[in-house]
Amino acid sequence: MSTRALRWVLGITVAATAASLLAAPAYAETYSAPLRTAVAALPVATEVRTGYNRDLFPHWIDADSDGCNTRYEVLIAEAVTAPSVGSGCTLTGGRWYSYYDNLYWTLPADLDIDHFVPLAEAWDSGARSWTTARRQLYANDLGDSRSLIAVTDNANQSKGDQDPAEWMPTYTSARCRYINEWVATKIRWRLTVDTAEKSTLTNYANSCSNVTITTVRAF
């Protein structure tokens, strides 16, 4: 099965979980707009960190009970060379590309799974008002390949909980992709931006190709 097809199958599993947990409507809203239009439409609000705790976003669950939690599902889906999957979801023989720094890795231990919009940033931007069930869905979102991404562990640790006004990939050729995916994730989860973030996104959008951003709203 191709990576794209596998990610689609995983997305179906998470979508079913979302429907049962959140009593979501029987339809999903698709958003599509040019990058500059999408950035302009992002709502601006003051970020609030009060009350944040990473444990409020239960993550790395095994949603489909196949023995592989979300971290490993992402590694399997994003491998450029498919790994063998052993007992306890042990991965061997795979190869991965980290686009933040333009590096390849063959050991899963060298990779972190980045919540593209970090959990703390999501909290600041609206997730503080969500239920724990919705935050769990966010933290394990396999329904859109941009939500979670395998990257070099040091790059993820350098990024931390920073937004694009504070951190961008060291590999400059990746920055337009990074902006596109940040905007798509914020739109998918109906998250706000702060003023510095909006300014940075606008500046990059004006210098990057005005590609169409398409995503399915999570709720």
Image (cartoon, helix red, strand yellow):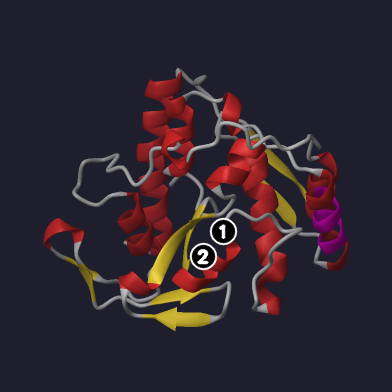
* Residue ID at (60%, 41%): 122
- Disc 1 marks which residue? 160
Residue 190 visible = yes
| Foreground of the two, 22 or 161 | 161
Q: Main secondary structure of the magenta part?
A: helix
Considering every residue shown, the one lying at the far left of the view is 87
Residue 184 lies, in percent from the top left, at 66, 48
Q: Quadrant of the N terminus?
A: bottom left
Q: Is residue 63 above or below residue 128?
A: below
Q: Position of residue 123 (x, y in %)?
A: 59, 37
Write down the region rendered in magenta: 198-204
* Amino acid type, label 2: Gln
At numbered mark 2, what does the secondary structure look like: helix, strand or loop?
helix
State if disc 1 and disc 2 touch (CB < 8 Å).
yes
Asked if residue 203 lies in the magenta stretch, the reply is yes
Relative horizontal placement of residue 60, taking residue 125 as reference (left or right): left
Name the mark on residue 128: none
- Is 103 in the magenta? no
Amino acid at pointer 1: Gly
Q: Mark 2 = which residue?
A: 157
Q: Nearer the viewer, residue 4 or 110?
A: 110
Residue 215 seen anywhere in this rendered image of the structure: no
Numbered circles on residues, count: 2
Rendered residue at 85%/44% (across/down): 40
Q: Is residue 159 left or right of residue 163?
A: left
